[in-house]
């Protein structure tokens, strides 16, 4: 990458909120984003999506916490796309 | 047929055949004459029958929340073919070179003035512009966070989920308790400089009818653009093919994306070619700039002038999105100590998110800001010690084998002392009597503001250090495909890389290398595109090194196959064979002509060259982080009208180690251009940003040096070969920019006796009025503001 400090791994998480949950769809997404924010690795990636970028272990650990937070808030689905620089197709 | 082999959607341009000089010789540019004649096709000149025009709706606010976007009125306009928002981004809605954090099109949060919100394709550019005005965006306007220091505070609003600190690089080296006989400290500031390339962002996206797209574009790194575009289009990379179009300058400002994803989205949505061209004002919002910096330094030295320690806190404003700021932050930190022996260092470099325009790569990449700080400190320390500032620099100059503050040992060659001594030895320009001179030789020129009264001359020095190539563990490489065949009865070498020519002369250099290695006069350098492997970015002064090495290696493999054929056909041993003037020979005896040997065949080889490994810095900022180091020293002679604060730079003298002069004329161009950009930062160039809003987005209000501002540049070039680099060369593009700025400021200090802590230096600083513009508007009747009002107030009206 032009910036040679590219994150080694990125995980994009997209939350699909549940209408049936106790919390509003906005709150379910917010819960996931709040958990992501605490990791120090997160940026927004869409209305209901966020991206975690950094080292492998820290990103994967943070992704787990985000998924847990989303599920605890009532989300029924969290789609995860993980890409590793040098391994993912886009970097070949 | 693979996707990559799909016929191009646009006829490929005829490739000019060069007859270049060899490495080390002056070699005319193949693109030189067409550019001078106005025949060169820049990306803004691209055209296809039936094409549509794209345009971008941008936020007028630096910080806001989007409540709603209504495109219905725009969509209904005759001639409008598409109006797209974030909902139409097929893949990842964010992009970024280091961290994907920048929306392709904003969905909720606006983080800088000029952020893209919607895009339009229409049958005429004016229709597209009118359609933008019909898009209704309901914003909730918020107070911008426009100060990096404020962004660092715990109670500042978070602009991104994980806060406002994009990166903090900490360097701890040696004894943290070290004390010194003499201590100087200072605070310094660098304004936001623009790359000010002349060709605005532009390109043409053409759908291939198979779901893929061709993009003809001016950029700095085709493959990284392709990967990011493919990600956001949700296409495999091979369905997105990029071809380089004529680039009207770059200087880092084209490393990040501008029209790439937008034009491809519109082309795929409409099924028509779509052209996008920013105008000058939009260009200021459409690319990243040099990071403004606030820096605090403390240097300690013995009473004899030997540096004991350096402490530095660098605060860089990255603006709204990351771009390449992570790497800039590291570079600034690693070069905060300058090219000096300093055994103890405590350096903190912070890169902050704010609501200012995004900043990223620009020539010098973090070393520029650091150099202004450490060189200002060297002037201050010399004054405190009662030493000559140049002698102080020479006394502390790094040498090969020394350890840099980030723990890396400086390899050979490292002629810091030598370049300083060479600059010192260069004769000073004649100090003509100021009174009665031709006005053009006085500050203010023919404005006739002085006839010599109050004019003082000053001389200043500075020296800089810069890494060449990508660092910190990045696997930096380039790919070259070289072939030789017979055309029109003569051997012809073709060179194909994805390396981007941005005006620096790389196309000529590649041809020179092929000419040198294969002994064939005729060379054709094919257009750069993604049909061949990545060449990396045209940045970090790296292409001559990395792509130069790849072309050289590919030529060597082709040559080896030629010799193999000679061995097979003539039973000749390989030893002593060479190719010269199109024949294979040994000891001056022709064995066979190449055209006869090759016949109707084509001998082709593709090589990927990777430079040696580098490593990330550890938690204390220590490590073998960088590949190669380049140095330049500058001496500036200035004359200042001390009553009006006007400046004439009389002369710049420079000494630079380039390892090997590959093309003397091109080298001179790089040095003179780099000095011009350094002069611009010293005296003129700054994007004025107030509360997150750009005040001077035009080349009328953003001041650039012209030929009248540029002094003669005397050069002393050293050729101390780097044993690990092709031909021993060192990258040359950035060092002239880095230390020319502080040399000019040093000369201004010498002329005026003022401290001058901020660049660009303004007239009011030189006459001692203030370091900054007045906070309070002047009273009517003062300073001529009564009738016209202040510039910033006029802008807001």
Image (cartoon, coloured by chain):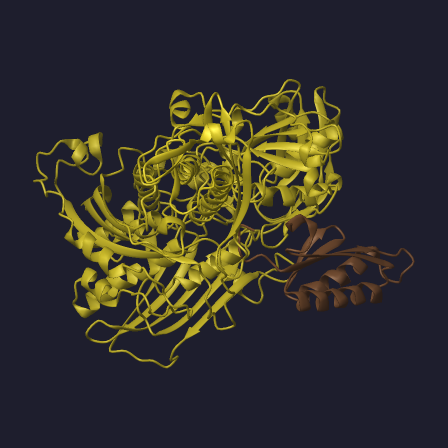
> Residue B719: x, y in percent?
28, 50
Whether residue B74 is visible here, answered yes or no, is no
Quadrant of image for the N terminus of chain B: top right
Tell me the residue at 46%/70% (across/down). B622
> Residue B322: x, y in percent?
56, 53
Say left or right for B174 vs B269. left
Name the residue furthest top: B49
Tell me the residue at 46%/48% (across/down). B546
Which is nearer the eye, B63 or B473? B473
Identify the colour of chain A in the image.
Answer: brown
> Residue B509: x, y in percent?
40, 38
Q: Residue B543's quadrant in the figure?
A: top left
Identify the colour of chain B in the image.
Answer: yellow
Name the residue furthest front: B571
Which is nearer the eye, B359 or B27? B27
Q: Is residue B551 above or below residue B463?
A: above
Q: Is residue B326 above or below residue B70?
A: below
Whether residue B404 is visible here, answered yes or no, is yes
Which is nearer the eye, B283 or B608? B608
Which is nearer the eye, B152 or B579? B579
> Residue B674: x, y in percent?
34, 43
Say left or right for B533 vs B281. right
Name the residue furthest right: A20
């Amino acid at each position: 990458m032009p910036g040679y400090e590219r994150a080694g791994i990125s995980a994009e998480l997209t939350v699909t909120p549940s209408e049936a949950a106790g919390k509003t769809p906005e709150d379910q997404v917010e819960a996931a984003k709040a958990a992501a924010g605490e990791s120090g690795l997160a940026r927004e990636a869409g209305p209901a999506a966020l991206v975690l970028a950094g080292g492998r272990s820290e990103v994967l650990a943070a992704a787990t916490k985000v998924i847990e937070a989303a599920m605890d808030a009532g989300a029924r689905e969290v789609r995860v796309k993980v890409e590793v620089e040098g391994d993912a197709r886009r970097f070949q | 047929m693979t996707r990559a082999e799909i016929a191009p959607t646009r006829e490929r341009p005829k490739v000019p055949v060069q007859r270049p000089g060899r490495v080390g010789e002056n070699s005319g540019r193949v693109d030189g004459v067409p550019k001078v004649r106005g025949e060169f096709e820049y990306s803004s000149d691209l055209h296809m029958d039936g094409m549509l025009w794209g345009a971008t709706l941008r936020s007028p606010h630096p910080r806001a929340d989007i409540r709603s976007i209504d495109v219905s009125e725009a969509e209904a306009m005759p001639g409008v073919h598409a109006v797209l928002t974030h909902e139409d981004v097929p893949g990842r809605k964010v992009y970024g070179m280091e961290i994907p954090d920048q929306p392709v099109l904003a969905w909720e949060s606006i983080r800088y003035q000029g952020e893209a919100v919607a895009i339009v394709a229409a049958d005429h550019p004016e229709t597209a512009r009118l359609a933008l005005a019909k898009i209704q965006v309901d914003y909730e306007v918020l107070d911008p966070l426009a100060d990096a220091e404020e962004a660092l505070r715990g109670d500042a609003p978070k602009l991104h989920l994980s806060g406002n600190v994009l990166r903090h690089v900490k360097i701890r080296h040696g004894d943290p308790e070290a004390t010194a006989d003499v201590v100087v400290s200072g605070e310094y500031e660098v304004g936001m400089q623009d790359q000010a390339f002349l060709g605005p962002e532009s390109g043409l996206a053409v759908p291939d009818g198979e779901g893929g797209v061709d993009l003809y574009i001016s950029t700095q790194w085709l493959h990284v653009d392709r990967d990011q575009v493919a990600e956001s289009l949700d296409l495999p990379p091979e369905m997105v093919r990029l071809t380089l179009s004529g680039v009207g300058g770059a200087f880092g400002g084209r490393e990040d994306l501008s029209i790439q994803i937008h034009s491809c989205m519109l082309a795929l949505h409409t099924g028509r070619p779509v052209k996008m061209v920013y105008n000058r004002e939009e260009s200021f919002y459409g690319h990243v700039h040099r990071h403004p910096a606030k820096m605090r330094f403390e240097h300690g030295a013995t009473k004899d002038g030997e540096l004991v320690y350096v402490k530095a806190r660098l605060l860089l404003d990255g603006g709204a999105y990351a771009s390449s700021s992570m790497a800039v932050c590291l570079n600034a930190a690693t070069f905060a100590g300058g090219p000096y022996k300093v055994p103890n260092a405590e350096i903190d470099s912070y890169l902050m998110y704010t609501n200012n325009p995004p900043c990223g790569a620009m020539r010098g990449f973090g070393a520029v800001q650091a150099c202004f700080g450490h060189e200002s400190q060297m002037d201050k320390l010399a004054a405190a010690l009662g030493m000559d500032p140049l002698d102080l620099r020479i006394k502390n100059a790094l040498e090969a084998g020394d350890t840099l503050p980030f723990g890396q040992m400086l390899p050979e060659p490292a002629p810091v002392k030598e370049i300083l001594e060479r600059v010192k030895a260069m004769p000073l320009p004649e100090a003509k009597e100021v009174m009665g001179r031709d006005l053009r030789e006085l500050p203010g020129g023919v404005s006739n503001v002085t006839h010599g009264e109050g004019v003082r001359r000053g001389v200043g020095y500075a020296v800089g250090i810069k890494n060449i190539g990508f660092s910190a563990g990045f696997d930096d490489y380039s790919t070259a495909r070289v072939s030789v065949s017979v055309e029109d009865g003569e051997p012809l070498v073709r060179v194909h890389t994805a390396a981007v020519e941005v005006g620096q002369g790389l196309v000529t250099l590649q041809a020179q290398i092929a000419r040198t290695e294969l002994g064939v006069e005729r060379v054709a350098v094919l257009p750069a595109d993604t049909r061949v492997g990545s060449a990396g970015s045209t940045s970090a002064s790296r292409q001559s090194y990395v792509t130069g090495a790849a072309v050289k290696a590919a030529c060597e493999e082709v040559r080896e196959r030629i010799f193999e054929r000679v061995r097979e056909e003539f039973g000749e041993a390989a030893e002593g064979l060479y190719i010269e003037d199109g024949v294979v020979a040994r000891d001056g005896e022709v064995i066979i002509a190449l055209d006869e040997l090759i016949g109707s065949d084509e001998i082709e080889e593709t090589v990927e060259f990777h430079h040696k490994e580098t490593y990330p810095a550890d938690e204390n900022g220590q490590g073998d982080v960088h590949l190669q180091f380049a140095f330049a020293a500058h001496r500036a002679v200035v004359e200042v009208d001390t009553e009006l604060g006007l400046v004439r730079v009389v002369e710049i003298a420079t000494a630079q180690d380039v390892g090997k002069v590959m093309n003397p004329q091109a080298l001179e161009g790089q040095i003179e251009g780099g000095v011009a950009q350094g002069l611009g930062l010293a005296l003129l160039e700054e994007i004025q940003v107030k509360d997150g809003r750009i005040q001077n987005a035009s080349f009328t209000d953003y001041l650039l040096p012209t030929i009248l501002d540029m002094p003669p540049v005397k050069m002393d070039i050293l050729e101390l070969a780097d044993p690990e680099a092709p031909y021993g060369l060192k990258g040359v593009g950035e060092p002239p920019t880095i230390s020319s700025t502080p040399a000019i400021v040093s000369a201004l200090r010498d002329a005026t006796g003022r401290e001058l802590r901020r660049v660009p230096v303004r007239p009011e600083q030189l006459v001692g009025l203030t370091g900054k513009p007045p906070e309070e508007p002047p009273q009517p009747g003062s300073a001529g503001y009564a009738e016209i009002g202040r510039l910033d107030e006029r802008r807001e009206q």
